[in-house]
Image: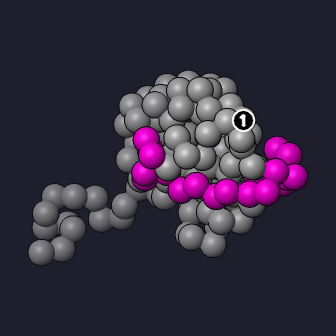
Amino acid sequence: MNLQESGRKEHADPRIAVVVPVYNRRDLTVSFLQSFERVTYRNFEIIIVDDGSTDGTAETIAREFPRVRLLRESGDLWWAKATNIGIRDALSRGAEFILTINDDVSVDPHLLDALVQTAQAHPKTLV
């Protein structure tokens, strides 16, 4: 049975990589990840770039959020370099869209739906 016969979409929704640099903000990072559990768009992956946290951030993510891709780094990256590492990882793994975001926010459940819809309506733009 092909996808059209099953009544499903012919093409899957674009794959989104959500890149989040973190450092020693375990509680904020956990709250952020919990907010993403309510996101309605399903074809996404969260990539956390932990820049050498010493407060248990990486261990908590590994234990409580096993689906999150966790890249552990040495502690000398700062925000921009950590973000770039996450973006390169996402691109190497076939991400079609990349969202860079900080860990000190809670996201609306429809955030990714809205971003994809806007990006598809306005090709070749930065959303």
Above or below, comparing residue 15 to residue 111 in the picture: below
Give the side of residue 109 with respect to residue 25, left or right: left
Q: Nearer the viewer, residue 18 or 70?
A: 70
Disc 1 marks a residue whose amino acid type is Asn
Query: Residue 28 at what x, y percent from top left?
Result: 62, 27
Name the quadrant of the N terminus: bottom left
The reply to whether the magenta stretch includes residue 64 is yes
Q: Position of residue 51 (x, y in %)?
A: 75, 49
* Location of residue 127 (image quadrant): top right
Q: Is residue 89 above or below residue 58?
A: below
Q: Which residue corresponds to mark 1?
A: 24
Q: Nearer the viewer, residue 7 or 14?
A: 14
Q: Secondary structure at mark 1?
A: loop
Q: Residue at x 61, y 40 (%)?
A: 57
State the residue in front, 75 or 22.
75
Stretch in magenta = 63-83
Q: Quadrant of residue 32?
A: top right
Q: Is residue 77 magenta?
A: yes
The residue lying toward the viewer, choosing from 123 and 73, is: 73
> Is residue 105 among the parts visible in the rendering?
yes
Residue shown at the point (72%, 43%) measured from the top left: 53
Rendered location of residue 118, percent (x, y): 57, 41
Q: How is the image coloured?
A: one colour
Examine the rendered structure and indicate whether residue 72 appears above or below residue 30: below
Q: Position of residue 105 (x, y in %)?
A: 62, 25
Q: Residue at x 18, y 74 (%)?
A: 2
Labels in figure, total: 1
Q: Residue at x 74, y 57 (%)?
A: 73
